[in-house]
Amino acid sequence: MPHTLRGLYVIIDPAVAGKRDVLHVAREAIAGGAALLQWRDKTREKGTQLADVRALAEICRVAGVPLIVNDDVDLALAAEADGVHVGQQDLPVGVVRRLVPGGWIVGASTNNAGEARAAEADGADYVSVGNLFGTTSKDDTRPATLETLREVEAAVRVPVCAIGGIDETNIAGVVTAGADMAAVISAVMAADDPRAAAQRLAAAFG
Amino acid sequence: MPHTLRGLYVIIDPAVAGKRDVLHVAREAIAGGAALLQWRDKTREKGTQLADVRALAEICRVAGVPLIVNDDVDLALAAEADGVHVGQQDLPVGVVRRLVPGGWIVGASTNNAGEARAAEADGADYVSVGNLFGTTSKDDTRPATLETLREVEAAVRVPVCAIGGIDETNIAGVVTAGADMAAVISAVMAADDPRAAAQRLAAAFG
């Protein structure tokens, strides 16, 4: 059954987790209502990540929540994830589509309606739009606004994921603006209580 | 027809090439007698590398020289290379073997006979042994000696590739010690005349 691409999208980043157990935070995020998870580790070599990503894929499989791996298609395949998310500098969506099994989710970072249309035409299952509110992460550093988000929604048929500094103070605004998904990193990964934080954030989707 | 894993193995690294055209250096290396090429780019995102790796794969196909891609199995698949080389921190050989088409070359970096035996048991087609003579590259920084090289050759049936600071002053020694291949980086990439340098280096294999 295809996964529903709607709701809270929690990025699991060991660098943001710090000393926390990333798998524990991931379980708490799911318990709090995360609809999708993304694994992102820009620091460690892939062989060092593999055990964690495989464990996370199993957690996600049991919970019925799709796991998307950032950038590395080979790591995603090795861990038997459910999809891959690529940025504008990563392997192109059309190339990635041919490397992954049928039914996998392929998402693409975009910054404007033109990039979003191109990603959709290349076969993306969803597009993200950012950076909306600033973030400490190094990706998607080009700025975007709620107006950009609305323009992208008008430009593509696939679901749209808002990203960039989204937290409890601004998530209602992106949902009102029409985002199908909202990606959060530190709002869950660095929260005192990741489950409660995910619950409050997920509630924005009604 | 399977490729012969013997001779001069030239690593094409854009960071070492500097302002030179890496594809030109690669053609010169082949013209000089390189038996295998490896693409290695630890700096740029994979999407940015793809056009170069595809062009190099085509050059290698025409020349009948196998192209091995370092670390990134997804980039290797996308560029239709002939193989992948993985280090001890990259995806494991056994995992990589299941991700690539039959007939692909899978090589593994090792530092001693134990790692080499493990890589062979996991399905590696060759193992590299280094770092023999020091190198400015960041990989394979654990030291190894010609005695290590001989121990690895005695421990495995697959071809063995010497690596680490190999140049015209020491390549005869690694061939005498029994290396099936010798991997060079700056000895060709940074040479005044890459073709002539490759010719002199390849001559060590008789």
Image: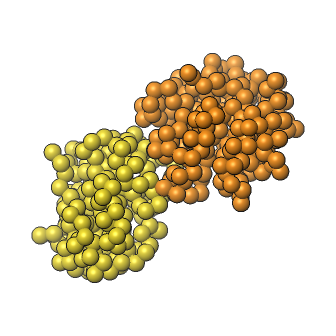
Chain colours: A orange, B yellow
Please name the residue shown 16% across and 69% down the image. Answer: B205
The quarter of the picture where the N terminus of chain B appears is: top left
Q: Is residue B23 above or below residue B74?
A: below
Please name the residue shown 27% across and 72% down the image. Answer: B152
Horizontal side of residue B86 vs A162, given as left or right:
left
Closer-to-camera residue (B1/A138): B1
Question: Which residue ends up furthest to the right in the rendered image?
Answer: A169
> Where residue A90 sits: x, y (%)?
52, 42
Residue A24 seen from this side: yes
Quarter-of-image position of residue A18: bottom right
Closer-to-camera residue (A50/B165): A50
Please name the residue shown 56% across and 21% down the image. Answer: A1
> Where residue B98 sits: x, y (%)?
36, 44
Q: Is residue B118 above or below residue B105?
A: below
The quarter of the picture where the C terminus of chain B appears is: bottom left
Horizontal side of residue A7 vs A176, given as left or right:
left
Residue A73 seen from this side: no
Quarter-of-image position of residue B161: bottom left
Question: Which residue ends up furthest to the left in the rendered image?
Answer: B206
Please name the residue shown 52% across and 57% down the image. Answer: A48
Closer-to-camera residue (B190/A142): A142
Horizontal side of residue B6 vs B187, given as left or right:
left
